[in-house]
Image (spheres, coloured by chain):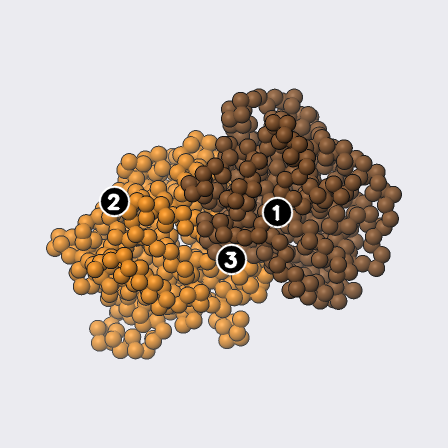
Amino acid sequence: MRRETREYPYDWMIWSILHQASLSTAGTEKEYSRLLTLVPHFRDILDSFIKHGEPGRIFLDLITGYADLCITAIECGRKVAMTTFCMATPLLYAFDTAPVMLEAWTVLGTMVLKRGTAEYLDYCCEAGFTETSCSAQRGALGAYLAGLAVRPDFIICDSPGICDTNANSFAFASAYLDIPFFQLNYPSTITDTRAAEYQKNDFRELVSFLELHTGTTLDETMLRGILEEVRVQDALASELIDLMRLKPSPVPGIYDLMFYGGRFMMSGKPIYTELLRSMLRTARSNAASGASGTTSKKERARGLFCYIDHYTTDARFWDWMDAQDISHLGSVLFTFWHGDAPYARERQDEAYHIDTSDKDTMIDSLAAQVSRMPMVKQIRGPYDAPGMWLDDLLGTIRLLRPDFVAYIGSMGCRNSWGMNKLLVRDLEREGVPAVILFADAFDDRVASWSTVTDKLQEFMNLRRIGI
Amino acid sequence: MIGKLKEAASTLSNPYLKKWKEAGKAVIGYPCTFVPEEIIHAAGMLPYRLRGVGTTSLSIGDTYFGPVICSFPKCVLQLAGQESYRFLDGVIITNGCDSMRRLDECWRKAEEDIAGILPGYFRYFGVPHKTASYSFDWFEQEIRELIRSIEEHFGLQITDSALRKSIRLYNSSRRLLQRIDELRSGPEVRISGQDALAVVLAGSSMPRERYTSILEGLVKSLESAPGRAEGKNRLMLVGSASDDLDFIRLIEDSGAIVVADTLCFGARSYSDLTDEKDDPVSALSRRYLSNSLCPRMFGYYRNRLSHILDKAKKARVDGVILQNIRFCDLHGSENGIFERDLERRGIPCMRMEREYGPLVETGRIRMRLDAFMERIS
């Protein structure tokens, strides 16, 4: 890692950029336009949010608030938990603990830093990590290993049984930094009683771990308040997904990122409810006028992404989709499996429900919720629904009617690369054009952004999609 | 004696296995040390550890797996696809790691193209990644489900008394392997690393009764065998699945002798015993799940480090080779911390990433070994 990179703490630097960005709309439009010329490396991503009006501004406030929560945790007397995106945050917030989600911090760095997270990715290898490990964690982990970010008090991950490379990053961090580690471990099935009981036991063990390491007991009232908020958020999210079923989809593509990004970082917090309400207002308005969510108000094609989106090079992915008049129908990160979600209607045994009657029911609800987070639900097997994402994708395809499915992921994802050829084959058999993009969503040194768009464009031309 | 074992270790189908099949008896393949072999044995079948011996191409493996996947499951799928595993009556796949877990789906999918390569009995066997009390309960239940499915599929019964008998037999052969380990890591070093690995590997592909009797004879002969350590660097081998005898030969040709290992194809498979007094299924669940020497058991780094330190001390090693198969992030990353923590304690280490399968990187590996020997000599 270069000396100059070591000069600034990674998390503070990102918070500072985000904070300034969130203030950028406080002035006049002229001032904002002038400001854009002064931030050449951040201009595209900033404008991607701001040009979407209120939802974009709320999202900037949300991520700034999240970053603030993490970097000020120690001085505010909060504990810091290093964790992963697929670990639902309500329990951590109920313990007033700051959830430092490696993937969220990787995406933030990838999007806003001039050179992305390349040096932090590579620092992990200097520290002993394999270069073939998943970049989703490595991007930010390098900063934490180098001491360039807040030091976590403990690590909680819910990927053992789901994703080795993810779990391995956290196990590595625990051993390297010598901090306590807790894993939620998942069997390969989801619908049977044995798996449900295992998850409940495991989750209670997590509560005990948190009580031990925060020195507090679980505040039932606080948890209930957070879960009630989650319930409202689930209902709003369901409506948003329902609107995406319309042709054209009235939901702007960038809402995809704001929807799941907001959920990962601030589930159960009022600002996320505000964001969802704001996004819904725009989407409803577009739907009422029969307009697409794209800037041109036209829909040329509908794309569904598996398994994630592409975050490098100023997050141009969503703007590129928008410029191409392609409606972004979400990725697997879009599915959280609340019982009221449109995709869960005929698959209630795979969904979770929130019951706030008492502490036990809330813990059980959380255990069920976490075990159905994106990735946790699909990649664990599940061996009662083989094919990893296949079942969920086919369900979503029936619901949202995309014109194509594109695989985007990271090179470190062993599950993906052990499955995506089979997946594409099965999707094609179902009549859905599908393509594997050989690239890394967090590291454009693997394949440049233009290579990604060229491949996608070529695929669409070849398959006569949107023509 | 070692010649017979070496032959069994170097080929996919050895004479013992052929004889077994000629007698009309069944063989069940499994890929990982977390599968209790005793259950298969108690069913009157031969537990056979899946390997990629003799793979010369990955054309089939690469058809189903993507490019950035460990070559071990690819080699297994390759052999299955070219019908080299025709002798298997069943296969049990575990979530030993993600690449291995996906072998389950890739093999099933390959069956759609190459009919008949999927054995009649093909089962996924889940193994928890932690050792909480409820993990043991869950794992015990999983073993009971496995027993039930074998009984149902093959129309037989696995009784408690048969299980106890198998546990005793496996324990006795593991004790003999532990004794060979002592002879290998003692001052005299009575057996080379290459031969020691061959001895262990042979056990994963031949009837246990015969194997145990060969081991008994072997221990006797090794106890009076001449020492082999004179003038050689004593090394320990750590890391990913490694069943390549030529790889050990290459190390030993460079002026070293491998006196200890923590490999799953090696010492990890016999380092502990099953309780013979307890309920057999419960005892098996404890023996197999407690073995946290594989980095798939997340959060047990300190246990593994102290195991290596203990072993390195007992075997008086001059250095440790930390190897991993490319794309094996579990071993690869942990090797990085091992390197830090072992070097801090004055134990020289060499990290090496390699491909599984026939040695195609001999030149590169030899050059690195020579450099390491120079450092520690």
Kind of residue sitting beneath label 3: Ser
The relative height of residue B23 versus residue B377 in the rendered view (above or below) is above
Kind of residue sitting beneath label 1: Val
The percent coordinates of residue A449 (x first, y second) are 37, 67
- In the image, B16 versus B158, the foreground residue is B16
Mark carried by residue A399: 2
Quarter residue A361 falls in? top left
Q: Chain B shown in which color?
A: brown
Q: Residue at x 38, y 56 (%)?
A: A436
> Disc 3 marks which residue?
A133
Residue B144 in view, yes or no: no
Q: Chain A shown in which color?
A: orange
The percent coordinates of residue A466 (x first, y second) are 22, 58
> Disc 1 marks which residue?
B53
Q: Residue at x 79, y 35 (%)?
A: B216
Q: Residues within 10 Å of mark 3 (few under 14, many from 20)?
A: many
The percent coordinates of residue B67 (x first, y second) are 48, 56
Q: Residue at x 65, y 31 (%)?
A: B20
Extreme front residue here? B22
